Every structure is written in C-alpha cells, then in structure tokens.
Image (tube, rainbow, N blue to C red):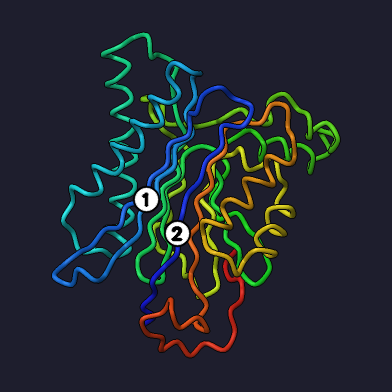
Amino acid sequence: MLAIKRDFAGCQIPGDRSYQEDTQSFVSMTEGSDKNVAHLLTVLADGMGGENSGDVASESTVQIFIDYCCSLDVSLNDETIHEMLYSAMLAANKGLAASVEEDPGLKGMGSTLLATMVVKDYLYWVSVGDSPLYLYRNSKLVQLNEDHSMMPVLQQLVEAGELQADELENHPYRHMLREAITGDDIVLVDCPTSGFKIYPGDIIVVASDGIQTLDERAIRNEIETNRAMTAEEIAHKLLTAVECAKNPQQDNTSVNIIRVPDPGNDTLFVASERTDTEIVLRNL
C-alpha cells in the first residue's frame, strides 16, 4: 500500500467578468481511529445567473455538499463513497430549491458541480454540468468526466455529417448546459460506482469551464512543461496561460491541482511498496 503526502492547491481568476461566480474548496477528511489516514475532498461549483445570484448558487452548492459529506460517519468503500457523493449532490440541489422558494428573486440561478474524492490510491467523483475533470499521466491528458453541455451533441452532428466542423467552433449553443444544479429534477449525473486507480506521477485537474479557452493540447503542454513544480505553481501556470490567450469574453476560471508525487521524491513519501514496472492509461 502506498502512503502519500499529496500536494494540492486551488487558484482562481475573474477573467473578463466584474464578479466571481466560481466557488471551490478542499477538505481533508479522516475516518476511524487512525486519524493519520486522510482523504481529500475537492468541490468546485461554477455559478449561473449573473452578478446577483450566480455566486449565491455556487457558494450554496459547495457549502451544502461539504456539510453533508462531513456529517456522515461511515466506513469508506466503493458503495458508501458513491452513495455519499450522489446524496450530497441531491442535498445541494434541494438546498437551491429551498433558497429560490424563500427568495423568488433568485429564480433562474444555478450552478455546475464537480466534486472529487481521493481515497488512498483511488479517485471518485460526481459531476453535473460542464466543469472538466482532467487526468495527466505519462505525457497524456484525458477528460475523465462527462460533459453535460451541448458540445458533445454538436460533435455527434459533425461526425454524422449534419454539421460542418468549422461551424462547431463558433456555434451559439456549444456552451449551453443540458444539466445543472438548479433545484429542479436532475437527469444527467456522472457518478461512477467504483474508484478510478491513480498512480505516482499522476496530476489531477479539477477546473471550471473557463480553462477551456485553452484546448486540451495546450493544457497538456502547460502541465508537461511544469509537471515537476508544486500543485500551486502548476495551477498558476495554467491560469497565466488562460490570461495570455486574451479571450475578450473570458469567463471566471478556477483550477485545482492534485499531484500524486513520484516515488523518487523521498521528502513527499511516507512509504512505498509499489512494485508496478509500468504505468499506462487504462479504461480511458
């Protein structure tokens, strides 16, 4: 079993907005009598509804989600983690419904939700909306979670020959959400029932969709160049790259980095008994 002191950090920029609708938080959770066994919960919400309510939606979503998870006293395994994340998502959605009922002026607000949990050497998540979860491994970058915007639907139209590829880039509906935390019934949820194995050298990126001003190749190259840096430094490098792109309509952007240290760095490892000789992308 691998015991790791993980390196993690989160940063934000407002982009071209005069307000910040992204909310993010890290929580270190423990279970049982061994309080040295910590599990990392990361929650990010990208609010919708404008200056007056988008921030309310994202802050409420993150706070209710965290409060729900921290209120439980369960032994963590695939089943209980899946149930916890899914139920916390439902609690956050119910909380938004209650807020709108109490203050009708908030009607129309909503938020994406992307929550991840690292338990030992496994990654779990629940995702509603279009905030991307990336994995960098062995110089490759892949998105692990589903995209609940219209982009995948439009891409299918391109593949079917019903939409031209150059039309996709500027399509007015490409960023329209098919699902979000709004207080209404939720149909599209990405919440795997089992953990995703992570390895030393992996870098996990939990972000709001503002990062997608950069394409995946640019994100991958930025991480590749700076992969030996700390999580905070990598997050800053990615946000600097977003700013340098000078998108005149740049959205709020939040980037959370979780580094699984390489076993060669003795200062970051408590112990290592791993014997794998090759780390490859699997089931992606």
In the foreground, 32 or 281 = 32
* Residue 248 on image: x %, y %: 73, 27
Mark 2: which amino acid?
Answer: Phe
Side of 202 where 154 appears, left or right: right
Residue at 41% from the left image edge and 58% from the top image edge: 124
Residue at 54% from the left image edge and 47% from the top image edge: 255
Residue at 26% from the left image edge and 58% from the top image edge: 29
Q: Mark 2 packing: few (<14 Cα in 10 Å), some, or many (20+)?
A: many
Q: Quadrant of residue 52?
A: top left
In the foreground, 72 or 212 = 212
* Residue 174 on image: x %, y %: 68, 31
Asked if residue 128 is positioned above or below residue 248 in the image, the reply reads below
Side of 246 where 113 appears, left or right: left
Labelled disc at residue 26: 1
Q: In which quarter of the image is residue 161?
A: top right
Examine the rendering and report whether any part of residue 148 can be seen.
Answer: no
Q: Quadrant of residue 25?
A: top left
Task: Please give the count of numbered marks on the rendered protein.
Answer: 2
Labelled disc at residue 8: 2
Side of 17 where 77 appears, left or right: left
